[in-house]
Every structure is written in C-alpha cells, then in structure tokens.
Image: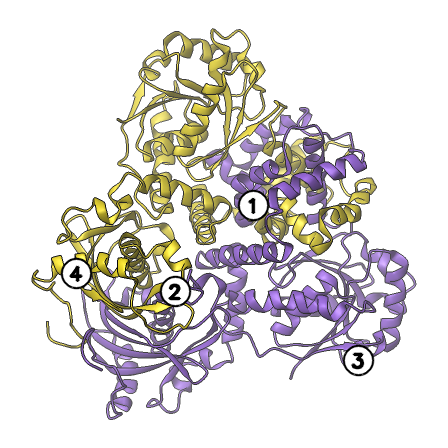
Chain colours: A yellow, B purple
C-alpha cells in the first residue's frame, strides 16, 4: 500500500524531502503558506526527477501523488511521516508541532530538519514529546544519503527504530547520535571550516575560488569516500593510528587555526566574499550550478557503487532491498513458464550514461546488456558463490543493433531469451525496450570457463540443468528478428 | 629528453613524489638514509603503478629510471626538480637545503613538502633563498592533484612560473598562495576539523566511524566537486551569496564549535580513538585500505572527468597536453599513408574497468572501441565544432569478438581500419592489442545523422572526402579475419 508523508514547510529542504519521498513511491502532502511554494517545490522536484531515478541500477517504485494543502491539519491526514522544515525560530517550530499534533496519527514520526536546535528544545511543551525527533538532512536532500537522527530519553525506542527503518527505505543513512549537542555533528565541522575560510578571505591569504580548489583537489576527494579518521589511519601506515596521533597530536598547540577569534561579519567582508564568488562562479546560473552539482554527485556516487564503498554501498543496499520481492528477485524455481522471455533489467537511464549527443552512449547499451547477462547467470545459479567456487561465463562474442535512441531518465527494460545452451556454451538474446519501443537488441555468445585455468569447461550439472530448462523450453520458438545477422548483411 | 627529479627524504610523501615523477616519464634519484627507504618507496610505487597509469584516457610517457644514492650531492646531480620531504624540524630542513645547494644546478627548483613551515623560515640562511619554495602535496601524492605553492618576495617570478609549469605537466594543480601563513591553507581546515572531531569523540557524542559517516555520506561528496563557497552559493539559490551569508552569518555567534578550547591530548583520548578506529577499520590491513582508497579515488576522479569538472577537468587538460605532439594529436593531413591502420587509442586499462572476474569488463571493450571511433571521427573532421554545427555519426550496429583477457594496468592500443564509407555510411574495424597479443576486434556500422531531425543524411563534402580518402586507400586490402561474421557461424 502506498504510504504518505506530510511536508510542513517547503523551500529547498522541504522540497528535497518531498522529492525523495515522492520518487521512492510515497504520496506527499505539502503545507507551506508561501504562495510560491508550489513553484519552488516544482523546481526542486524537476532537479530530483532528472538525477535520482537513474542513481540505482534498478527502477524505483512508481512515483507517488503530490498534493498541496491549506492547513497543517489537512496536510498531516493519513501521514506516517511528518517532516518539519519551517524557519529556524523556536516559537515557529513549537507552534508547528502543536498544530501537527492536534491532527496527526499519534503513531506517526515527526522529524525536524533543524540544523541548530536540540531535540529537547523542540520537544518543550509538546503534547507528545516522544513523537518528535531531529532528522537533519543535507542539501540536495534527494541525493545525499546523510540524515542526523537525534533523539532524547522521551522518544520510545520503537519510534526511533521505525524512523530509522523508513529513512533507510527511502535511501538515506540515519546517523543516530547518542547525545544531543548544539548543531549536531556535521554542521559543527562546516562551521569550523567556514570560520577559518572567512579569516583566510578577510586576511587576503586566499580567494573563495582558491579555497574551493584547496578542498576539491585535495582532502575533499579523500573525505568523500573515507572521512577523517579512516583517512588518517591509512596515512599512519603500518605503524597504526597511535603512531599517527603521536605525530599529529602536538600540532594542536601550534597556531594553525584562528581558534580564539571570530571574524566580524561586516558589510565589507560580505561584499568581498560575494564579489569573489561572482568572479568564480558567476558565469553559471544557479540552475546550471545545481545541475552540474547533481551530475557530479550522481557520477561520483555511482563510481563508489562500482567499488561497493561509502555512499555507493548504501545505493547497493537499497537496490538489493528493491529487487527482493520484485520480479528481479526471483529464483529459477519461481519462474513457471521458462519459454517466456525473462525480465533481466528494469531501470532508469542514469545521468552519467549519456554523451555529447544527449542520448545514451553506445558503450552503455553493452553495460545494460552485460547487467542483463549477469542477472540471467544469477538466475540459473551462476551467482557470487558459484563464481567464488571457480567457475563463470566469459563473453566470447557480442552483436548489438542500435534501433532507436533513448535519453537520461527513461525507464528501460531488458527481456532475455536463450537461443541455445548447455555444456560450455550459452547463447543469449536481449531486447531493450522503453515501453513498447524497441531500442536495441544484443546477441551474446558466452563460454563457461574455469577461473583457475582460464579455459573453457563444462558448467556444473546443476547450472547446466537450469540453463537447459530455459534453452529447451525456448527451442521451438521462432528465432528473433536480427539473430545471427552479420554487419553489412541485407535486412 | 628525459628530465630528472631528485627526492630528498623518502617515506610516504617522498615516495609519492617519486612515483608521480617516474610514472610521468621522469628519471628519479633518491636520497634517504633510512635503510628501509628502497622498500618503503617500492611499496608506494607499487600502489601508484596499479592506480595512476589508467587514470587518464591516454597512455603516460614510458616510466623513467629510479635510482638510490648515498649522498644528497649525488642525488641532485642533473636534477631540475629537487623535492625535500625530510622530517618537520627546521634545523634538519636547513641542513638539507645547505647540502642541496652546495651541489645542485642553480636553476633547479627546490620544493619543500613541509606542511607547517612558512617559506621565509625555510629560506633563512640559505645560500640562494630564491631557489627554495613550499610545494606542499597531499597523500596519496601520485593521485591527488593539489599542491600548495607558497613563495616569498625572494623567489624570482620566473622560478615560480617554472615550478608551476612542471607541476602542471606531472598532473598536479599548483595552488599559488599570495601570502605565507602557518600551515598554508588546506591543513588549517584539516586542523579545525580534527580539533572538533577530537572533542566529539572525547565527549562521547560520536565515534570515529560515526564522524566518518557524517562526512562521507554528506558534505564530503559535495566538497569533492565544488568545495565550500560554490556549494554555499548553490544553497543560497536565486537570492545569491549575500542572502546566504545573511542567513548563515549570525551562526558565528552561536556555540556551534568548541572554539575557545583545545582538548588535552591524554593517553586516555589516544586509546579511545585508536580503539574506535580498530573497531571501524581493523578488519582491513593498511595495504588493503590503501588499495580501497586508491580504487575509490580513481573511480571518483574518472567520474568527474566524464563531467569535465573539478579534479576530472584537470585530468582532461593533462590528457590533451599528452595527446598534442603524439600520434593521437595528428590531423588527417599529417597522415601520409591512409592505407595503414590508424592508431586511435593508446592507454592503460584503468582500475575501474575491471570486474569481479579480475579482468576488463565486457562493456569497457565497447567503451574503448567507442573512444577509438570518436578519435577516428575527430581525425576526419567530425570534431566538436562539426557536431555543434548539427551533424554526427550514430552507431547502428556493433560486433565484438573477445579473443583474450586483459587486466587493469595493461597498456592497450587500438588500430582502426575503414571497411567502407561515404555518403551516410561509415564501416569501421578496430583491433585491440596488448603488445602483439590481439585482445578483441570491433566491427561497427555507423550512419551520419542530422542532430536536428535525428535522421540519416549525407556527411558534409569535406567530411565525406576525408573519409573516402581512407576508405579508397584501404579498399583493396584483404578483409580482416572475422569481419562480416555473425554469431554462431563457423570460424
């Protein structure tokens, strides 16, 4: 059954939450008194629709329904998740919680996007303190997985577990903090760096662009995958973390930061920074920068996914959860009609699969067909465990016909037929569709190999039997159009 | 002519410098009194050899010669770059510079890897102050492009420009700081975050793993591509940077960091952190973590390269410089014998092109063949300008034969023949080799299209003529083995 989230307060953060829930198949009900709220959320949603669906190598559930409501009471009706993203003033927060709790399901989670207030402050005077906790996300909320979950002793542990489960299912990483503290964890680092950066600009040591380069060409890339401590653990080398700290510890007494001082936030400093920022980035509009940022984030997070690491490992886990229970999670035994083509890929075309022609790059057709082959192999029992035991299939020959173009964001499906197989051989036929539109066909001849000798050898009896079940059932079907074709042969 | 760098002081940083110069084709002469120096540099070099060569989509020059020397005087002989990475004690630095300057070429650049000392401190008492400047790199030096170049008024501007030029040619980004300051720029941020992180662990707010997650699932990924200020510019939205600062400025007065306080570096704190770090990362050895880190960095930097952004844009620029002047930078007019197959790809197999079988993934064969097609298109005049004018070639059909495996790091070449072409059509044949070993063939049939109508149409007369020159010259050659084959046909 479709689940419902209420978004109280739109803007960039509320809009990002709305987009994440919607694109993960939730219905979303929005309350925001701003007459521009629908347009603003629409802008965020447009960015999310172009970047999020293709982030995973499996399709998300169909998009939910988005609706706007005139009152908080109406917005929270039927919602099991209520996300508060109103301005950072405690009285406004308290008033919002009061209105929410007069109308909402008492079992619903009420998450606050606050970056500064502690949950105990938010819970003051609430009708049910236990329902409210901090769920602080990071912009763009539809792409970045981090959400800081901060609770108090007032929150029942079941509610906290429910909240963490829901956040995980919509692709986030709930970082549950043990103790409440001003600004939680991540923003304390941002604040420390921001202060130091203001000094460096004010003192004329570096411009905003030079500071950004100092971050993105160096430790920024390190932190994107390992964070601070694991990076230092590696830097410490074989001597270990203690050795690293012995080296680096004394630096705490050195004058390396403007620790004792806060720069005065004068109009002059604001103008200096705004001017440098214009010189650095002013040739791009904010909309362009948003899309550049999202393209970069998608490309890097998908790169980490190939390494099953960091934010990429989170994508892999979400993907696995989506596959389970779907047609892509079936075992061979679940398939009643082995004569029917098998669904092997169901996904959106990701942003990083398109080229200068604006359409899916030719190599990505083979990537998708390769994924289809992998899924079919898994289905017949050539899975990670089988491969670890020393056998696999290697592709010997591939023939692709590009029938029609497809663009980023399109939902594609691949259905797979077995043209022959048994012993060492497997001959597969993939058809890629967007809806009823045939995009491409892939014909592949594979050989079963021993990973030790790197030579062809027969598949295991169980694997052979599973493959033959499909091959035999499909043997009498008429051959697909284009199979066995060579380049240059008349159609 | 091969150029020579001298590395004074090995270890992780000196070894990283040695690897970067060597793999960019420089001869490298090392002085390090540590009897373990050769082994330690060998370890770093092994990591660099598996990750750096494939980072670009073009081969680096052949590796230079590595030699070890018993004295500084011998090590600096013939060197035009001398990199000092000795321990961070000023007297050791001064003694090293004195020994270097007694023997070195007076025109050589002497760069110091110091993370803490200012260049004016390093230059004290030097025979030639103007030759010494700070060139502070980031670990792993062979992959991360950032190097902080800090000069004083003593450094001639020609020397500074020479230094920046050399650093750029070995793939680094010289960030030239206008004023010297303790710890330069990037380490001031690291120090600010480190202090805050120590507090959070000490106060029991978060563990080392939770802090790393707070970084790598959130702002770390943002910073890896845009840094601090550009990220905030985007967050400010249409209202701009001034609006953003007006919102965020007051937070400077809030208690969001432990500004006034430095945590005491007790044995208890060290044990707490080392213990948490073991729990977080102890299931990997340091060697494993280094390789995981390098895999991640390569994958993310290459992802940014596809977006021509940040560290990826630097890779693109280095690649362009390497192509120019090589066979891959030729124009059609440079090619005297159009009957000979054309070199279209010359590169190392990057780390992120291999799969669970440990060899190059099947889709990457088509990626490489697609790159070969792009290069051939560029050669005959179907370049970025032509494509911007509204015409291009789309691949209609592809046939790949996988003949042999290839692993990450292998140097591969693709040579391209024209089997036919003219009007709307282009029929290409690619052969991929590692040395004399044939790895795969790719046969491709392409159609020239109008990017407006998305339909096939004749190529421009100039493009057509350039293509026919190759097609006609190659028409009488015997067809390559495997051309026109269909899957399942007998060999």
Res. B295 in view:
yes
Q: Mark number for residue B77?
A: 3
Judging from the image, mark 3 belongs to the subunit labelled: B
Which residue is under mark 2? B361
Residue A450, image x, y percentages: 37, 68
Element on which disc 4 rests: helix
Report, in whole angstroms, how far the alpha carbon at label 3 lies from the one at label 1. Answer: 41 Å
Sequence-earlier tag: 3 or 1: 3
Report, in whole angstroms, how far the alpha carbon at label 2 lies from the one at label 4. Answer: 25 Å
Query: From the viewer's perspective, is the residue at label 3 or at label 2 nearer?
Result: 2
Query: From the viewer's perspective, is the residue at label 2 or at label 4 nearer?
Result: 4
Seen at 57% across and 54% down, the residue is: B293
Element on which disc 3 rests: loop
Sequence-earlier tag: 3 or 2: 3
Quarter of the image where the C terminus of chain A is located: bottom left
Sequence-earlier tag: 2 or 1: 1
Are circles 2 and 1 on residues that touch, CB within 8 Å? no
**In the rendered image, which quarter is residue A254 located in?**
top right
* Residue under disc 3 on the same chain as residue under disc 2: yes
Crowd class of label 2 (few under 14; some 14 to 19; many from 20; radius 10 Å): many
Are circles 3 and 1 on residues that touch, CB within 8 Å? no
Q: Which of A315 and B99 is in front in this view?
A: A315
Are circles 4 and 3 on residues that touch, CB within 8 Å? no
Which residue is under mark 4? A471
């Amino acid at each position: 059954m479709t689940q419902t989230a209420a978004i109280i307060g739109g803007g960039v953060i509320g809009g990002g939450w709305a987009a994440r829930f919607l694109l993960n198949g939730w219905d979303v009900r929005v309350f925001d008194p701003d007459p521009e709220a629908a347009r603003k959320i629409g802008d965020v949603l447009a960015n999310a629709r172009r970047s999020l669906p293709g982030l995973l190598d499996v399709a998300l559930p169909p998009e939910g329904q988005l609706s706007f409501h005139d009152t908080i009471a109406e917005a929270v009706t039927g919602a099991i998740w209520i996300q508060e993203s109103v301005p950072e003033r405690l009285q406004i927060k308290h008033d919002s919680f009061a209105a929410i709790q007069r109308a909402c399901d008492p079992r619903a989670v009420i998450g606050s996007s606050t970056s500064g207030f502690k949950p105990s402050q938010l819970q003051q005077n609430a009708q049910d303190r236990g329902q409210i906790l901090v769920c602080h996300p990071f912009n763009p909320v539809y792409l970045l997985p981090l959400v800081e979950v901060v609770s108090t002793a007032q929150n029942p542990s079941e509610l906290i577990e429910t909240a963490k489960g829901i956040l995980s299912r919509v692709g986030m990483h709930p970082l549950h903090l043990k103790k409440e503290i001003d600004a939680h964890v991540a923003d304390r680092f941002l604040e420390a760096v921001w202060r130091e950066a203001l000094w460096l600009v004010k003192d004329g040591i570096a411009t905003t662009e030079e500071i950004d380069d100092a971050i993105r060409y160096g430790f920024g890339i390190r932190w994107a995958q390992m964070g601070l401590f694991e990076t230092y653990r590696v830097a410490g080398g074989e001597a270990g973390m203690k050795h690293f700290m012995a080296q680096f510890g004394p630096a705490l007494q050195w004058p390396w930061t403007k620790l004792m001082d806060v720069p005065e936030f004068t109009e002059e400093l604001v103008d200096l920074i705004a001017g440098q920022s214009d010189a650095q980035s002013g040739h791009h509009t904010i909309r362009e920068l948003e899309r550049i940022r999202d393209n970069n984030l998608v490309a890097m997070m998908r790169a980490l996914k190939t390494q099953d690491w960091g934010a990429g490992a989170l994508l892999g886990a979400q993907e696995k959860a989506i596959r389970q229970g779907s047609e892509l999670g079936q075992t061979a035994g679940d398939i009643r009609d082995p004569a029917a083509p098998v669904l092997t890929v169901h996904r959106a075309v990701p942003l990083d699969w398109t080229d200068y022609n604006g359409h899916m790059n030719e190599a990505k057709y083979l990537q998708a067909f390769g994924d289809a082959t992998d899924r079919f192999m898994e289905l017949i029992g050539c899975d990670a465990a089988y491969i670890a035991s020393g056998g696999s299939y290697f592709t010997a020959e591939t023939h692709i016909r590009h029938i029609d173009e497809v663009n980023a964001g399109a939902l594609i499906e691949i259905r797979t037929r077995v043209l022959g197989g048994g012993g060492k051989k497997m001959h597969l036929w993939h058809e890629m569709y967007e809806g009823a539109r045939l995009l491409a066909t892939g014909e592949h001849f594979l050989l079963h190999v021993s990973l030790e000798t790197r030579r062809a050898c027969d598949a295991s009896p169980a694997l052979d039997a599973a493959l033959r079940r499909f091959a035999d059932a499909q043997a009498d079907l008429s051959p697909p159009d284009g199979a066995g074709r060579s380049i240059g042969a008349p159609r």
